[in-house]
Structure formats: C-alpha cells, structure tokens
Image (cartoon, rainbow, N blue to C red):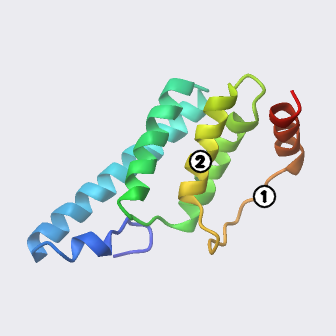
Amino acid sequence: NSPTMASCIKYNANFPKGMQDHVQKEADTEWGIIKEGLERNCASSDMVGILHFCKRLKRFVRCQYDMPATDKAQIVRWLLPSVVDERTPTGMASYLMSTLCCVIREKDQLDVAVDWKPLYDLVDRVVFP
C-alpha cells in the first residue's frame, strides 16, 4: 500500500487475498468520497452536508482505517472554520470537534497552523455565555 491509500490491516488480514484487494479498493473509494464531500460542503458552508460527511468520516475511522497526515491536516483546515463560526450552533460545533478528535491522534505530526484566538473566543462563548 502506498502511504496515500487508506488501509485497514487489522480487518483485511482476515479475508482471503482476492477479497483483501477488493475491500482495500472499496476503502480507497470511500475515502475519496469523504474527502471530496467534506471539501465541497465546507467550501459552501452547507452544515447538513458537513455533518453527513463527518458521520461517514467517523465511521471510516472507527473501522480503523488509517489516512495520511496530509489528509488529516486538510480535514482540520476544512472543519475548523465551521467550528469557530459564531453562527454554528454549539451542538454542531461540538460534533465537529469530536470528529476532529477521532481523526487526529496525539502522535500525529500535522503540518497545520491553528490560530488560537478563534478557539479562545469559542470557549468564551460556550463556557461564559
């Protein structure tokens, strides 16, 4: 597997070789659909679409598929503006943050810079309404 492909070594190993390749192709297809959907819906600020693809992303991660750090960083860049947007309801912002927490692991070294001020303002809005 190349580092850009989604991989699920834990489960794929249980399938016969021919089926492993098929499952891997399905995972790669699903990963492409998720990335394209998140990019498109985040660009248009379509919250229903964003939530839909976050749900698919969480399911993908729960199946223990891995993804490249560059893709994880891109997901942060796509979702964070919606998280800190004042118009985003608190419950939805919480769901988006939980999605980011599912995607990002402590050991990940992501090449992404995050401005602290919008996150600080979010905490201020939520904790001290």
Give 87 or 34, whichever is nearer the viewer: 87
- The percent position of residue 113, horizontal first and vertical second, equals 78, 58
> Would you place residue 120 above or below residue 92 in this image?
below
User: Please, what is the three-letter code of the amino acid marked with disc 1?
Assistant: Ala
Circle 2 is placed at which residue position?
98
- The percent position of residue 5, horizontal first and vertical second, equals 38, 66
For the residue labelled by badge 1, is the local secondary structure a helix, a strand or a loop?
Answer: loop
**Label 1 – label 2 distance at C-alpha:** 19 Å
Residue at x-position 61% and y-position 31%: 92
Query: Dividing the picture into quarters, in which one does residue 36 lie?
Result: top left
Q: Residues within 10 Å of mark 1 (few under 14, many from 20)?
A: few
Circle 1 is placed at which residue position?
113
User: Please, what is the three-letter code of the amino acid marked with disc 2?
Assistant: Ser
> Would you place residue 9 above or below residue 114 in this image?
below
Where's the C terminus, which quadrant? top right
For the residue labelled by badge 2, is the local secondary structure a helix, a strand or a loop?
Answer: helix
- The percent position of residue 65, horizontal first and vertical second, equals 38, 64
Query: Dividing the picture into quarters, in which one does residue 94 lie?
Result: top right
- The percent position of residue 78, horizontal first and vertical second, equals 63, 43
Residue at x-position 73% and y-position 22%: 87
Where's the N terminus, which quadrant? bottom left
Residue at x-position 67% and y-position 67%: 110
- Mark 1 vs 2, N-terminal side: 2
| Of labels 1 and 2, the one closer to you | 2
> Would you place residue 77 above or below residue 61 in this image?
above
Give 42 or 11, whichever is nearer the viewer: 11
In the shown orientation, is residue 75 left or right of residue 28? Answer: right
Give 9 or 21, whichever is nearer the viewer: 9
Residue at x-position 69% and y-position 29%: 90
In the shown orientation, is residue 85 left or right of residue 56? Answer: right
